[in-house]
Amino acid sequence: MVWRAWRGRRIPLAWLLLTRQPMRLAVALAGISFAGILMFMQLGFRDGLFDASVTIHRQFDADLVLMSPRTISSIGMAAFPRRRLVQAMADPAVRGITPVHWNLLLWRNPETRTTRSILTLGFEPSDPLFIDPALTRQAQVLTQRGRVLFDERSRPEFGPIAERFRAGEVVETEVAGTRVRVEGLVNLGPSFGADGNMITSRETFLELTPASSPGSIELGLIRLEPGADAAAAAERLRRLLPEDVRVFTKAGFEEFEKTYWRTSTAIGFIFTLGAAMGFIVGCVIVYQILHSDVSDHLPEYATLMAMGYPLPSLLRVVGREGLLLAVLGYLPAYAAGLGLYALVRSGTRLPVYMNLDRALVVLVMILVMCLASAALAMRRLADADPAEIF
């Protein structure tokens, strides 16, 4: 039985052909891994920037959101009458509302005295704003005029605010030329449109932006009764409210922001093109390796054909070489992608993470890249004629 198993074993011809020249194999794997890393980084940057654009949006305690139809994105928020949010209370599914002011203001670094735009949110401290219940407890300190909560995950260009606050120092600076004091820290994270965040009361916000109308807001958060259908409630409010306000579900609110960055800017096209270029580079590398391998071993392939081996079986050998190259090249690319994502998060604080969807997309792209290159290299073998070679 052992002898029959031994005689019936399949010779790993594809593996033997690849490993016959270790240096060529190493170069091939390096090229495939480089192409995979390039695709991982381009797609990771693209998705990370889109996810970063809704960092704040995801944390709002809301089922529906009201916005002005003139709003184009978080960096261009337009105001609408606050009374529209009050009118929304007429719907029986509405449980509560939170009017929110939203604007980019200039924050002065208390150490370097340089200024930088910071996203500022103003609301009534007694109203729910974020899902995190810790903010509700912290918001009580905002009842004093000139008090703010600073996002400790903001970029370091705003100054060592979190470090000084934890050290027990009184942290004061200027925002839009007005003196403010940091009374607490929150953990939100920068978005694509803002490098830092600050939360304050409605009263302080209006003091920082004297040109703002007290009767206008930039966002209206609506909380529904438990079990209420958000899509149905949004449709009812669209019929109820005038055309000077738009109604979104929370998911639609996030998608509205992503769509702006995806379609109104070059971000999506640039990073998608970068991933496509990595794919093309990988195809060229793999094709050159497999074409050279087939050309170098053409007499051996011709000998096997002369001995009676059918052409399809030999073509499958080339196909298996492509499959082996794809798997062996993907593994280091995946490992390098994990490390580079961590480096990007540390350096930019953007939410660039490895997820299953992206890992599978890159794997499929590498498989297609290698198998397509193998199919092109097969043409060299298919044209081989044992009589001409010998």
Image (tube, rainbow, N blue to C red):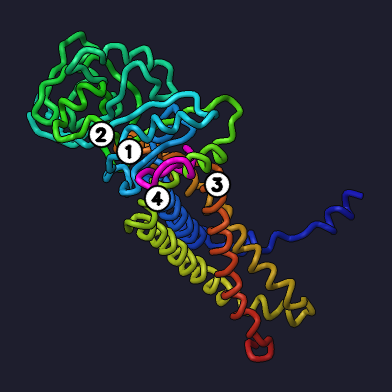
Q: Position of residue 32 (x, y in %)?
A: 48, 58
Mark 2 or 1: in front is 2
Q: Which residues are magenta?
A: 239-253
Q: Is residue 252 within the magenta segment?
A: yes
Residue 386 falls in image quadrant: bottom right
Secondary structure type for disc 3: helix
Is the Cβ of the residue at disc 2 closer than 8 Å to that at disc 4?
no
> Residue sitting at 41 percent across and 47 percent down?
256
The numbered mark at residue 191 is 1
For marks 1 and 3, the one nearer the N-term is: 1
Q: Which residue is mark 3?
A: 357
Secondary structure type for disc 4: helix
Mark 3 and mark 4: Cα distance apart in space? 14 Å
Mark 1 and mark 4: Cα distance apart in space? 13 Å
> Residue sitting at 80 percent across and 57 percent down?
9
Q: Which residue is mark 4?
A: 46
Within 10 Å of disc 1 (Cα), the crowding (few <14, some 14-19, many 20+) is many
Within 10 Å of disc 3 (Cα), the crowding (few <14, some 14-19, many 20+) is few
Mark 2 or 4: in front is 2
For marks 2 and 4, the one nearer the N-term is: 4
Mark 2 and mark 4: Cα distance apart in space? 22 Å
> Residue sitting at 65 percent across and 81 percent down?
382
